[in-house]
Amino acid sequence: MPYNVKLDAFEGPLDLLLHLINTYEIDIYDIPVSVISEQYMNYIHTMKELKLDVASEYLVMAATLLAIKSKMLLPKQEADPIDQQMGFEVEEDPREDLVNRLIEYRKFKQAALHLKEKEAARSLVYTREPADLSAFGKNEETVNPVSNVTIYDMLEAMQKLFAKKEKNLPKRTTIERQEIPIELRMSQIINELRLENGRKRFSELFHHHNKEHMVVTFLAILELMKTKEITCNQDGNFSEIFISVTGEK
């Protein structure tokens, strides 16, 4: 049976488009549709390669981007001043509707972030004297398994690995099918990390050319993140992602 994973980190196609716009420092009012649609499709293909559940709304957005791209390729007719004065419709920018949706989505996302910060600040306010809880022992600090790494960073790292492995494949090779259980690969990853003082580069965990092995490794990493057995850190955009065992440095 295929091992399917659905990630809650995806908030929808508009969220993915905003991520691409911010990553590539694109002006939201003048989106280069050709570039953004190519990057968007790369993410969709990578999600399918990893057998992740791709919601239909992502495919609808992909079709929308391709439709806008096609309209942008058509020759533009210059607006006639006489037609404008007489109230005839002037050809609109095919990106206008998408830009408006992105701007509205960004407003709501920023508002949600602001409310979340308010919620976090309010959760620190207490209306009673602190009770003596020494008898219950110290609660372990909750560890964020993804730290400053987003699911888009993980997918981008996998895109680079796929491209690098495919480039280095020999022209002739013997294909051997080898089934690797997710649980076994999870245990192997933990052991590999502990042999390297509990920390290793994301790319170093993919030391096999076999695509099935790479996919199983990626899914095992996601499962370990979900169970908070490992943490992921990234110093900045496009920099290397580091995987470490939770609680070990």
Image: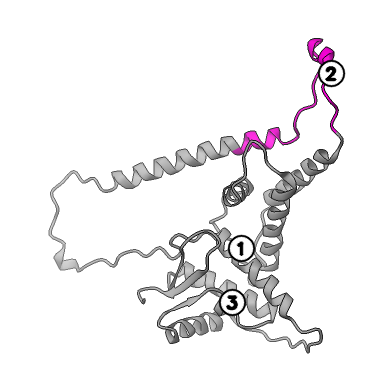
Cα distance between the residues tagged 1 and 2:
46 Å
Q: Nearer the viewer, mark 3 or mark 2?
A: 2
Asked whether residue 2 is in view, the answer is no
Residue 183 % position (x, y):
54, 80
Q: Amino acid at mark 2?
A: Asp
- Compared to 94, does 181 lie above or below? below
The residue identified by callout 1 is 156
In this view, the residue in front, 146 or 87, is 87
Callout 2 secondary element: loop
Disc on the earlier residue, 1 or 2:
2
Q: Residue at x 86, y 28 (%)?
A: 77
Is 36 placed left or right of 222 in the picture?
right
Q: Residues within 10 Å of mark 3 (few under 14, many from 20)?
A: many
Callout 1 secondary element: helix
Checking the image for residue 220, the label placed there is: none
Q: Nearer the viewer, mark 1 or mark 2?
A: 2
The residue identified by callout 2 is 80
Q: Amino acid at mark 1?
A: Glu
Cα distance between the residues tagged 3 and 2:
59 Å
Disc on the earlier residue, 3 or 2:
2
How did the renderer colour the structure? one colour
Disc on the earlier residue, 3 or 1:
1
The reply to whether discs 3 and 1 touch (Cβ–Cβ < 8 Å) is no
Report if residue 21 lies within the magenta region: no
Checking the image for residue 217, the label placed there is: 3
Is 143 placed left or right of 46 in the picture?
left
In this view, the residue in front, 144 or 93, is 93
Q: Residues within 10 Å of mark 1 (few under 14, many from 20)?
A: some
Residues shaded magenta: 76-102
Rendered-image quadrant of the N terminus = bottom right
Residue 12 % position (x, y):
61, 49
Residue 166 % position (x, y):
73, 75
